[in-house]
Image (spheres, helix red, strand yellow):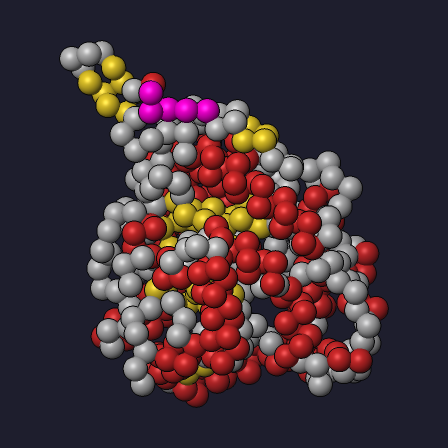
Amino acid sequence: MTASPFHLGWFCNGTSVPAWAQPFSGSIGDDWQDAQIFVDLARAMERAKFDYVLIEDNTFVGDRYGDSMEVYLKYAMQAPRQDPMIVATLLAQATERLGIIATAGTFAYHPYLLARMAGTLDQLSKGRFGVNVVTGTSDRALQNYGHDGMDEHDSRYDVAEDFVRAMTALFDTWEPRAVVADRRTSTFADHTKVRYADHRGSHFSTRGPLNSGPSPQGRPVISQAGGSSRGIAFAAQHADTIVAIHSSPEKARDYRDRVRDAAAAAGRDPDEVKVLFGVWPIVGSSEAEARQRADERVRLAMDNIDIPLATMSKSTDIDFSTVPLDTPLGELDLATNGTQNFALYRDRNATLTLREAVAKEAGGAGPSLVGSVEQVADQLEAFADVSGGDGFLIGTNGVTRRFIAEVCDGLVPELQARGLTRTEYDHEHLRDNLRAF
């Protein structure tokens, strides 16, 4: 194999609560309000030289499955969930080089508010902050912010386009050398190098300039997860890093090629857009142990099938409690809210029944990565070799300190020994580290 070095990120699902009943979860059920596990995670990732942690978010308590909140709250499914911007501040103070990306919905902020917040976090982290821009996947989330519901899929990207352009205009209000701090002339900032944004778009207006001052990176890193043609065009235009999930390296390669073509068409250097593919590895001390744990995960999913079905209900607005479990997915007429993840889920499982698809994907939506440290490293290397991807975003359904150690102290050292991941940070800023290779 000839895989080039790749980047590593961590997909943090925004709360430790889902792991509360898992083995090796400690006292999460009692201590979930204390974010110390995120601090432990961030410090372990920094030791392992991850590029960044992405703090995922959603802003509502699910109730679509069976038209009730029961399953969601009984199993702590994505609720309670703390604000990722606040968690990001904590992680910035606990680390020195790790990039920190927090999720923000374009429906939940005005561009000025988010630009000021993100710019401040970039300052506090000394150039390590980023924003994962999302357009919304549920009417329920938007209703919490006073909207009736979501717009049509492509219209949401029109809003996001205007949103990011407004933020960019605000970040550009301060030139790089606007702050002079010259005691001799009693001048802190050169007013000739600070200007108004005066952005007036189709959805947002903002005057500027940002009163928080310049961002160390010029502007914080932008992350996105566009899967549709419109989403890819948006991400290729604006994002520094893109999150994608594909079960095969061939499909991953095709997706990355589309992103790079779109970036070139937008006048960008495709190498400036890093595509990281989501993976949910199961790492054991041996293949037998890892397989046993993978089998146990499937068994738990089938014994508690309400959990994966309710998860899909929350992201698609389909009540899966009413969907036949033993009919092939390809034969079901399911109208979603436009989320691309479920479209991909249905396509790759079209010949399977819903019950079979749940069992197949109990370990995560990405490629199957199960085995010893060496075997999972082999699998990642093989995937990267075929996909040509820029790296991987590692995640799990409910983080525990055991999983953190398995990845950061087990898997990553093996990848480093093979020359596949970094052993030191090249730069102080997140964007520069992403562009280092």
Tell whether 429 sits left or right of 221. left
Query: Residue 375 placed where, x, y %?
Result: 37, 84
Residue 177 visible in the displayed image: yes
- Magenta segment, prevailing SS (helix, strand or loop): loop
Tell whether 192 sits left or right of 23. left
Looking at the picture, does residue 368 appear above or below residue 169?
below
Which of the 4 image quarters holds residue 213? top left
Which of the 4 image quarters holds residue 1? bottom left
Looking at the picture, does residue 49 appear above or below residue 161?
below
Viewer-nearest residue: 34 or 427: 427
What are the residue bounds of the magenta stretch? 192-196
Query: Residue 229 placed where, x, y %?
Result: 60, 63
Which of the 4 image quarters holds residue 346? bottom right
Query: Residue 369 placed where, x, y %?
Result: 46, 79
Viewer-nearest residue: 61 or 20: 61
**Magenta stretch: includes residue 35:** no
Q: Residue at x 43, y 88 (%)?
A: 288
Looking at the picture, does residue 311 appear above or below residue 4?
above
Viewer-nearest residue: 321 or 27: 321
Looking at the picture, does residue 399 appear above or below residue 371?
above
Q: Residue at x 46, y 43 (%)?
A: 87
Q: Quadrant of the C terminus?
A: bottom left
Tell whether 433 sits left or right of 296. left
Q: Residue at x 41, y 59 (%)?
A: 273
